[in-house]
Image: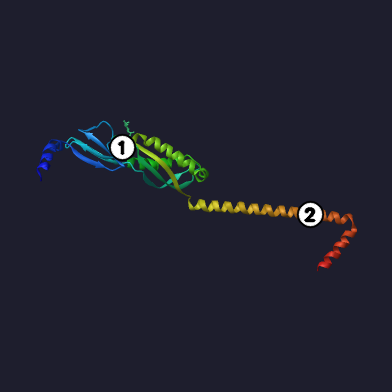
Amino acid sequence: MTGLSWFLVGITLPFSLFVCFKVVQEYERAVIFRLGRLVSGGAKGPGIFFILPCMDSYVCVDLRTRTYDVPPQEVLTKDSVTVSVDAVVYYRVSNATISVANVANAHHSTKLLAQTTLRNVMGTRPLHEILSEREAISNTMQTSLDEATEDWGIKVERVEIKDVRLPVQLQRAMAAEAEATREARAKVIAAEGEQKASRALREASEVISDSPAALQLRYLQVSNEH
Ligand SMILES: *[C@@H]1O[C@H](CO)[C@@H](O)[C@H](O)[C@H]1NC(C)=O
């Protein structure tokens, strides 16, 4: 080493003995505890920050959005049908300090809460609403999840209900019901056709009975056709 390097090391040695530089990525923050207490000024980062060896400990928090695939939940709807529902939840850490200081494991807690919220929200609604109002249910879920996770520094951005699976027996019953409805409608249409046809026949017979010559003409016409 040159003389200058030694000189620089000599100058910075006292300083570098006491501080230690760390780097976090653009999407990360470091929550620092100095002798067990939160360092004021909030989480550090992105970029370079320093800690005091032996006195400081720090936790790195990732702020990027995460997705959680809620596994299929067996839910009893308000009208006592068991359905299997799964969803996707998008969430991120909105306040790194709180997410470290207030809850032991923010991600795990959010996931568990997402499962129970899915069950609770579904349990308050009848089946036809679950099938037809997914958008509204997703929004309700997002709002109630977000309110609950606010204290953990977690922001729930989106909830999407992926799939609502009905029990096989109910599927069969619904298919049978739909078919019966279709058949009934077909019968009504056929009956209406008959009604119209008979009305037309009656009018025709009235016309014919009014003038006997009409009947003769009709005979002639029919025999002409064959
Ligand atoms: C995080 O929460 C703490 C405590 O409520 C607050 O002092 C701090 O300003 C918040 N940080 C951000 C980035 O909102």
x and y percent of residue 172 in the render? 53, 53
Residue count near mark 1 (Cα–Cα under 10 Å), binned few <14, some 14–19, many ≥20? many
Which image quadrant is residue 158 in?
top left
- Inspect the image, locate mark 2, and give the three-letter code of the amino acid beneath it: Ala
For the C terminus, which image quadrant? bottom right
Q: Nearer the viewer, residue 76 or 207?
A: 207
Residue count near mark 2 (Cα–Cα under 10 Å), binned few <14, some 14–19, many ≥20? few
Q: At x 45% / y 42%, what residue is drawn?
A: 138
Q: At x 76% / y 55%, what residue is drawn?
A: 197
In the image, farthest residue toward the bottom: 226
Residue that numbered label 1 is attached to: 96
x and y percent of residue 164 in the render? 47, 48
Mark 2–mark 1 Cα distance, whole angstroms, equals 81 Å
Q: Nearer the viewer, residue 8 or 181?
A: 8
x and y percent of residue 192 in the render? 71, 52
- Inspect the image, locate mark 1, and give the three-letter code of the amino acid beneath it: Ala
Q: For ligand 1, tell me if the residue under mark 1 lies within 8 Å.
A: yes
Would you say 166 lies left or right of 199 here? left
Disc number at residue 25? none
Would you say 132 lies left or right of 11 here? right
Mark 2 or mark 1, whichever is nearer to me:
1
Residue that numbered label 2 is attached to: 200
Secondary structure beneath label 1: helix
In the image, farthest residue toward the top: 40
Q: Nearer the viewer, residue 54 or 41?
A: 41
Secondary structure beneath label 2: helix
Q: At x 65% / y 54%, what residue is drawn?
A: 186
Of pointers 2 and 1, the one earlier in the residue sequence: 1
Rendered view: 92 above or below 177: above
Which image quadrant is residue 33 in?
top left
Would you say 211 lies left or right of 100 here? right
Ligand 1, image quadrant it occupies: top left
